[in-house]
Image: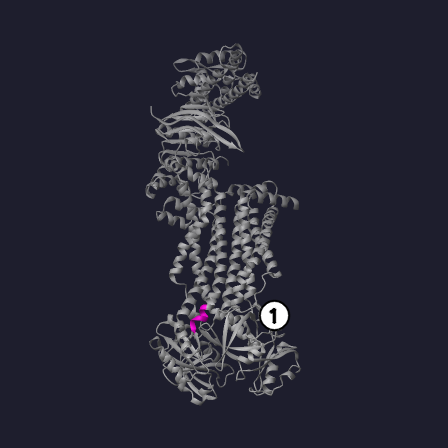
């Protein structure tokens, strides 16, 4: 099985007013191609830091990161930026759309950066927005649309270049139940079409959409659960939701 | 409440040290410029009054030529006279210095300075009483480039006297240099122009004209003549009008630019605090309270900066005031004036108050949630046209992003452009002035001096003169003679200046704007001032009473004449009967050279050949001098304004980046390299600057034109020269350099933003 | 089975097969499969207690069918039931027993126990989501699934709490 993302002995230590604080203390993780991995854990366990290191937003203090078979933890900031354009899509809790660009501009930007012509970028953007059911907000600025719509736009922006891996940091943390379900559905849909996803969340329900749930404590992976989709639904029904009369 | 406001304000200021420092720097620089501009205005305004105040100027000068029997001493006690000084011996002598020579009206003095028209020393010292010492008027010293310690030679009746300049002084009167009585007697024995001078102060200065008229009725001109202070004022104003307007408008520009720059910085600061305003209101501040808080906060900053800035401005003001005073021939005024300090500090404070209160009040009225939500950026629903154009032009995405960012907050973009455009307009102004001077220097016809050298002489005969000129042979392309006099037009009260040309004047390229050059006797070309004053047009008849004869002329053309208010007429000397022509002023020779760069060489050759008996003046020199004197003032102001503009743009960009740290984080997440972030910030700044340059050129040119016309109503429209196009083109790369400088720090800051940190917190 | 049947009869009288069908309609897969015998047993008991009365209705070519109707007593009993607040769901205490006892007796590592249990809960959550996808908008079942999911999320939180309290207590005796 091919691994898209591999980390070995990943460590990250921050300096907090002169006191070193360990956020990650040696994380070994391998994400297979097409796999959907959730990372759970209490706040401060280092799960967001892990995600940032995976996407090159920050630099590990120790250890290695391999993306698509290539060692990337020592890349320069610029090299990472260029790598991210094609290989890594990011989604965040607070959507993080660029406030003064329209939805269309936000989605087209990574394509343009990756060297697509404006026409190509526009075509791909139309396709994705239609797929996500939000083509009607293409001309709006982010602040004028709902949170759920913003997150879908962010998802479109992250997926526009068919990245090798989608990194999602609490993507539903700021959404209502309905939007959470929709976004989760979209993630699941893209996963089914082969998208590799690493998702950080504290929401067990969201995490359970993954193939594998990783638990982190104090900067270490404390446990790992593989989830299967193999159980018989009828049997499940009798076991989980049966009224007792 | 007040204490709470003060405490909150101080905390706010300290919480953003860089922003606070930058705004403080801008206000300090602005206040310094303001003080400089005010000093400059004060220094350039009404030079006559400045001189008069500094020198206890005379209301009336009374002159009795040698041999007059008039009793000057008795006049000191005439009715209406409050004080008198003199009489002093005066006499004219020719002074040679370097290669040139000039006639100067010397005045005798003791080791005590005269009480009335008391020369105010600007350098050196007053006469000690020793022979051979000389104190020179500042205007002449400046014009001729003579300084304390220089040695001059005075020539009269072929005798030479060596003189040493011991001091330079300012005076409102018509006489000076000053020498001791014995020196004067040695160098200017009794002649036509020598005599005695009495200075009078009247009880009522406004009655001076009547007093002078009374004297003129009682005495023949060969016994006594008198002028009043109005004549002095006219002389000073004539000689300084261009400089006054140029300096006045430069300082006005500076004041406007300063206002805009402060407004821009402060408004930007408040727009950047919109989110805080929402939080303050959530904490219970009323809109009024919010406004008060920001006013207090910015006032603390502004007052401190204004005081420091004004002090700096006053300390620097001699740098501008010294050349200004040189230029105007005034005493150097002091920069420390209560008005400057008060206007500097209070003016800055007032501008800060207004530009704090308005946006703060508007922001204070936003809903709490709206303010918190909008805090990061003001929201435009449609992208700016420029950004769309940038996209359409297929510029790199980072550049397009930068352009969009620059216009994310329209009001800030507009303010920045306005203040930069004003700065750029001053650059256009300076370039225009430079171009106009260059054109006037190179094209002597625009000065109505279509020749390179003007030769005058008192004691060289006409044949000898012709021989001297012939001696220079091929270097001289043409020689015309000119004799001038005041003339009157029957039926009109105004006097005009008439010039009768002889010799080969036909090829003289006067700058004819209407009609044609006169072709022979009976025809004249005139200045616009004459046409306007007499209500005449090209084609009309012009009867003159000149040299005691009636001269009938027809106006065949109008030419550009910068002197004598353009109330001038030029015609063939054969239009005037020879007897009348003899009563015109002494004949001068206008030499046209084959190569105008040879002017100084020919000048020295003529002086050598004549044994120093000629007075040769290169026509370029006076204009060149004027330009050289204006340059430091104009460019000094320019440099200060550009520097402020730089800090201003820098602050705007920094504020924008501070507000949008998160957006820059996202830029990096979606794949902008640090270099691209750098490019995007620089591109944004560049677009603002380029628009400002274009706007500055567009508004600067007409303003410059209008100011030149104001300086010289008669011929300004013909003189005003647009800056050389390649200089204007150079403004674009200049602006790029400027923006790059301004963007370096903000862009580096943006490029250094760590996405993981920028995106961690909401 | 008593009160659901009374509730079904509150709107209109019905015979046994109709009752079964209606119950299935309302609860779908959430109820265990019902057999007709169960229903008739329950109805017989209700008739005996005087909560319902049965009337024979003649049918062509078939034996009479019995149509059941709610009595006043039956209505009163039903209203009483509805009016009573329902006690909270019982805590699933079997795992807790295992956890406490396993640690105490050294039978198993409580940490492994928790981990295994968490895996089970997460898998259940995932299963519920699959179930939800298959519920095809059946409102009763869908609500039931959400309820079960929320219970599971609470269980997971409780598990984390157990982990924190028990394991830290274990580390620092």
Q: Which residues are magenta?
A: B618-624
Locate the N terminus of chain A and report the quarter of the image it occupies: top left
Instruction: Give A232 or B380, whichever is nearer the viewer.
Output: B380
Label 1 packing within 10 angstroms: few (<14), some (14-19), many (20+): few
Instruction: Give B477 or B385, whichever is nearer the viewer.
Output: B477
Q: In this rendering, would B29 be left or right of B555?
A: right
From the viewer's perspective, is residue B381 above or below residue B639? above
Place of residue A157 in the rendered image (x, y in percent of width and height, measured from the top left): 39, 37
Place of residue B416 in the rendered image (x, y in percent of width and height, measured from the top left): 48, 52
Please say whether residue B698 is visible from this viewpoint.
yes
Q: Which residue is mark 1?
A: B53
From the viewer's perspective, is residue B729 above or below residue A8? below
From the viewer's perspective, is residue A190 above or below residue C32? below
Please say whether residue C19 is visible from this viewpoint.
no
* Magenta region includes residue B502: no
Instruction: Give B134 or B373, whichever is nearer the viewer.
Output: B134
Q: In this rendering, would C58 be left or right of B231?
A: left
Which quadrant would residue A6 be assigned to in this image?
top left
| Predominant SS of the magenta segment | helix
Residue drawn at point x = 36 percent, y = 41 percent:
A112
Q: In this rendering, would A158 be left or right of B635?
A: left
Place of residue A25 in the rendered image (x, y in percent of width and height, measured from the top left): 47, 25
- Scheme of image coloration: one colour
Place of residue B248 in the rendered image (x, y in percent of width and height, measured from the top left): 52, 65
Q: Chain of mark 1?
A: B
Which quadrant would residue A186 be assigned to in this image?
top left
């Amino acid at each position: 099985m091919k691994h898209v993302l591999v980390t070995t002995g990943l460590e990250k230590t921050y300096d907090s007013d002169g006191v070193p604080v360990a956020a990650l203390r040696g994380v070994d993780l391998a994400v297979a191609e097409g796999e959907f991995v959730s990372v759970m854990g209490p706040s401060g366990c280092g799960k967001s830091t892990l995600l940032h290191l995976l996407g090159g937003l920050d630099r590990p203090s120790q250890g290695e990161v391999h993306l698509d078979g290539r060692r990337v933890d020592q890349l320069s900031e610029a090299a990472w930026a260029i790598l991210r354009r094609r290989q890594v899509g990011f989604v965040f809790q607070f959507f993080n759309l660029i406030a003064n660009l329209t939805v269309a501009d936000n989605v087209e930007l990574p394509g343009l950066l990756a060297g697509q012509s404006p026409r190509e970028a526009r075509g791909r953007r139309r396709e994705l927005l239609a797929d996500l059911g939000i083509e009607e907000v293409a001309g709006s600025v982010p602040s004028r649309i709902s949170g759920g719509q913003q997150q879908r736009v962010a998802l479109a922006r992250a997926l526009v270049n068919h990245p090798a891996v989608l990194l999602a940091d609490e993507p539903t943390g700021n959404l209502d139940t309905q939007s959470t379900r929709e976004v989760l559905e979209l993630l699941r849909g893209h996963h089914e079409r082969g998208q590799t996803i690493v998702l950080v969340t504290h929401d067990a329900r969201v995490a359970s959409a993954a193939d594998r749930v990783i638990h982190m404590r104090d900067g270490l992976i404390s446990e790992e659960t593989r989830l299967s989709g193999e159980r018989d639904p009828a049997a499940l029904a009798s076991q989980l939701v049966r009224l007792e009369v | 409440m007040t204490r709470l406001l003060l405490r909150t304000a101080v905390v706010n200021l300290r919480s953003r040290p860089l922003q606070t420092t930058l705004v403080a720097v801008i206000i300090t620089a602005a206040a310094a410029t303001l003080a400089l501009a005010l000093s400059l205005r004060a220094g350039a305004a009404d030079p006559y009054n400045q001189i008069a105040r500094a020198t206890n100027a005379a209301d009336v000068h009374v002159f009795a030529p040698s041999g007059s029997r008039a009793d000057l001493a008795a006049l000191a006690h005439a009715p209406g006279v409050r004080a008198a000084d003199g009489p002093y011996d005066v006499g004219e002598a020719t002074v040679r210095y370097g290669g040139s020579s000039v006639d100067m009206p010397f005045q005798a003095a003791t080791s005590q300075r005269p009480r009335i028209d008391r020369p105010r020393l600007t350098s050196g010292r007053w006469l000690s009483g020793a022979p051979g010492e000389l104190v020179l008027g500042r205007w002449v010293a400046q014009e001729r480039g003579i300084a304390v310690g220089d040695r001059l030679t005075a020539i009269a009746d072929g005798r030479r006297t060596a003189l040493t300049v011991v001091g330079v002084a300012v005076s409102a009167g018509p006489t000076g240099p000053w020498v001791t009585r014995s020196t004067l007697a040695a160098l200017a024995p009794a002649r036509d122009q020598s005599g005695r001078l009495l200075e009078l102060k009247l009880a009522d200065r406004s009655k001076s004209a009547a007093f002078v008229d009374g004297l003129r009725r009682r005495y023949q001109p060969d016994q006594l003549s008198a002028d009043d202070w109005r004549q002095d004022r006219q002389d000073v104003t004539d000689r300084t009008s261009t400089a006054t307007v140029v300096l006045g408008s430069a300082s006005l520009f500076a004041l406007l630019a300063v206002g805009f720059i402060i407004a821009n910085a402060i408004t930007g600061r408040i727009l950047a605090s919109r989110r805080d305003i929402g939080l303050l209101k959530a904490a219970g501040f009323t809109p009024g309270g919010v406004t008060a808080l920001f006013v207090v906060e910015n006032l603390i900053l502004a007052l401190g900066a204004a005081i420091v800035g004004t002090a700096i401005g006053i300390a620097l003001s001699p740098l501008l005031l010294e050349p200004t005073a040189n230029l105007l021939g005034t005493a150097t005024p002091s920069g420390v004036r209560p008005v400057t300090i008060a206007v500097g500090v209070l003016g800055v404070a007032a501008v800060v108050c207004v530009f704090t209160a308005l946006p703060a009040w508007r922001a204070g009225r936003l809903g709490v949630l709206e303010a918190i939500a909008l805090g990061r950026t003001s929201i435009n629903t449609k992208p700016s046209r420029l950004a769309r154009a940038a996209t359409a032009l297929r510029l790199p995405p980072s550049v397009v992003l930068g352009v969009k960012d620059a216009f994310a907050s329209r009001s800030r973009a507009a303010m920045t452009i306005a203040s930069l455009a004003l700065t750029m307009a001053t650059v256009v102004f300076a370039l225009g002035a430079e171009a106009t001077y260059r054109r006037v220097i190179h094209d002597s016809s625009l000065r109505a001096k279509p020749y390179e050298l003007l030769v005058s002489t008192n004691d060289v005969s006409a044949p000898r003169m012709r021989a001297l000129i012939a001696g220079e042979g091929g270097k001289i392309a043409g020689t015309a003679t000119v004799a001038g006099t005041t003339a009157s037009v029957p039926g009109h009260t105004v006097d005009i200046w008439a010039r009768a040309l002889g010799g080969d004047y036909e090829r003289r390229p006067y700058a004819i704007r209407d009609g044609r050059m006169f072709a022979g006797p009976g025809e004249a070309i005139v200045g616009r001032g004459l046409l306007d004053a007499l209500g005449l047009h090209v084609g009309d008849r012009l009867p003159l009473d000149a040299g005691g004869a009636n001269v009938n002329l027809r106006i065949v053309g109008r030419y550009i004449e910068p002197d004598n208010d353009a109330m001038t007429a030029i015609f063939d000397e054969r239009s005037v009967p020879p007897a009348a022509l003899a009563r015109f002023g002494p004949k001068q020779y206008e030499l046209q050279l084959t190569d105008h760069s040879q002017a100084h060489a020919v000048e020295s050759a003529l002086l050598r050949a004549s044994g120093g008996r000629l007075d040769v003046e290169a026509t370029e020199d006076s204009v060149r001098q004027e330009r050289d004197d204006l340059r430091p003032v104009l460019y000094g102001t320019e440099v200060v304004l550009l520097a402020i503009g730089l800090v201003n743009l820098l602050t705007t960009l920094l504020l924008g980046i501070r507000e949008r740290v998160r957006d820059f984080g996202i830029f990096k997440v979606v794949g902008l390299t640090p270099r691209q972030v750098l490019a995007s910030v620089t591109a944004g700044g560049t677009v603002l600057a380029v628009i400002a340059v274009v706007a500055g050129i567009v508004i600067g040119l007409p303003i410059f034109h209008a100011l030149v016309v104001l300086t010289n109503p008669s011929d300004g429209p013909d003189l005003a020269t647009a800056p050389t196009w390649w200089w204007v083109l150079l403004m674009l790369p200049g602006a790029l350099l400027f923006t790059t400088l301004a963007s370096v720090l903000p862009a580096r800051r943006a490029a250094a933003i760590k996405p993981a940190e920028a995106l961690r917190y909401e | 089975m008593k009160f659901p049947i009374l509730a079904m009869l509150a709107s209109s009288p019905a015979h046994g097969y109709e009752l079964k069908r209606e119950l299935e309609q309302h609860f779908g897969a959430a109820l265990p499969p019902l057999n007709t015998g169960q229903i008739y047993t329950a109805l017989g008991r209700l008739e005996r207690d005087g909560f319902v009365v049965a009337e024979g209705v003649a049918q062509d070519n078939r034996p009479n069918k019995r149509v059941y109707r709610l009595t006043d007593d039956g209505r009163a009993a039903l209203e009483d039931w509805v009016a009573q607040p329902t006690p909270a769901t019982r805590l699933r205490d079997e795992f807790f027993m295992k956890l406490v006892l396993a640690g105490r007796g050294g039978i198993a590592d409580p940490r492994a126990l928790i981990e295994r249990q968490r895996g089970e809960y997460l898998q259940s959550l995932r299963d519920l989501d699959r179930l939800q996808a298959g519920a095809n908008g059946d409102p009763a079942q869908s609500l039931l699934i959400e309820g079960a999911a929320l219970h599971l999320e609470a269980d997971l939180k409780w598990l984390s709490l157990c982990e924190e309290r028990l394991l830290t207590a274990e580390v620092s005796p």
